[in-house]
Image: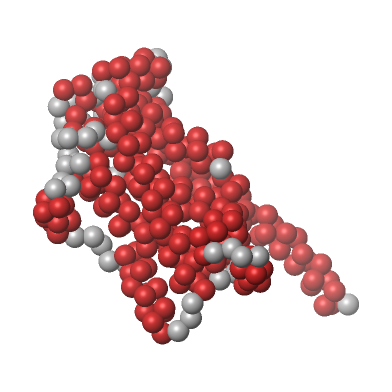
Amino acid sequence: MSTTATAVRRAPRRRFRFSFQPVAAILVAVLVLGVPFWLVVATAGKDRAEALDPDLKAPSQWHLLDNFATVFTDGKMLPAFFGSLLVMVPAVVGVLILGSMAAWILGRRGGRLSAAIYALAISGIVLPPAVVTIVLLLRQLGLAGTALGMIGVYMGMYLSTVIFFVTGFVRTIPHELEEAARVDGAGPVRVFTRIILPLLRPVLATATILICLYIWNDVFYALFVIGGRIDTLPLNLYQVASAGLYLQNWHLIFAYIILMSLPLLITFMVAQRRIISGITSGAVK
């Protein structure tokens, strides 16, 4: 009887503890993500005098749309937007194709040699690229300051990420699918394009979002490779943040950041289910 009474007394405490943990997690997430987001939006909605010292106070009068219009027209965002697309789209397509093909081979072949090649292929995730060496190599190849050179740099940097993501997923695909296609007379290219590639869509969607996020926000490597020749959105913001339109104009800087983030934010909202399925599908299988 005493044991039953003790269990009854402990039950409300457990329910309270289990109900409190999700609420606490949500509150922490709101503070960690919501406070910086509000700071950006509130500062972007102020005029220059109010935004001189950015804080969490709401603007006395909202100028968000006016700041967006000023940034878009005077900040030369449209050429920088197309410059970002010019570099990002070919780099993402190229690295996905090459990375998925390499991951298919590495995921299907065993042995020490394949394991060593796989370890070497994913070592780029840990080892940072040497900027000086990259710039010198591009100069010798005549690709310094060109979009083609920047595309090659991004492909080399994020090829390891694609191979790492896709190889584990390839190993979950049954061999019988490929064997049936080969029995029907399909060659390696047809097997990859007709059988393997459609099955890789979830994980490739996840890799696409991650790589697009890295490339879209990159200013460090773009500054050394194509700085001054091709404008991307973050590079354009960096170059004018300390002079001209953006000199001490924090409201315009934050307005620029919001507009620059909108394309990826919209893409993530549209493709979030596919992204989550790509992250979890390998573990589930």
Q: Relative to residue 72, is residue 259 depicted above or below? A: below
User: Which residue is pictured at 41% across the width and 78% down the height?
Assistant: 114
Looking at the rendered image, the quarter that the N terminus falls into is bottom right
Q: Relative to residue 253, is residue 106 depicted above or below? A: below
Out of 195 and 250, give the one closest to the viewer: 195
Q: Position of residue 106 (x, y in %)?
A: 45, 72
Q: Position of residue 143 (x, y in %)?
A: 17, 47
User: Which residue is pictured at 40% across the width and 73% down the height?
Assistant: 118
Looking at the rendered image, the quarter that the C terminus falls into is bottom right
Out of 102 and 58, give the one closest to the viewer: 102
User: Which residue is pictured at 67% across the width and 59% down the height?
Assistant: 18
State the count of labels: 0
Out of 282 and 113, give the one closest to the viewer: 113
Q: How is the image coloured?
A: secondary structure
Residue 240: quadrant of the picture:
top left
Residue 217: quadrant of the picture:
top left
Position of 233 with respect to 262 (left or right) is left
Position of 25 with respect to 82 (left or right) is right
Residue 197 appears anywhere in the view: no
Q: Position of residue 93 (x, y in %)?
A: 41, 48
Position of 65 with respect to 270 (left or right) is left
User: Which residue is pictured at 75% across the width and 60% down the height?
Assistant: 12
Residue 150 appears anywhere in the view: yes
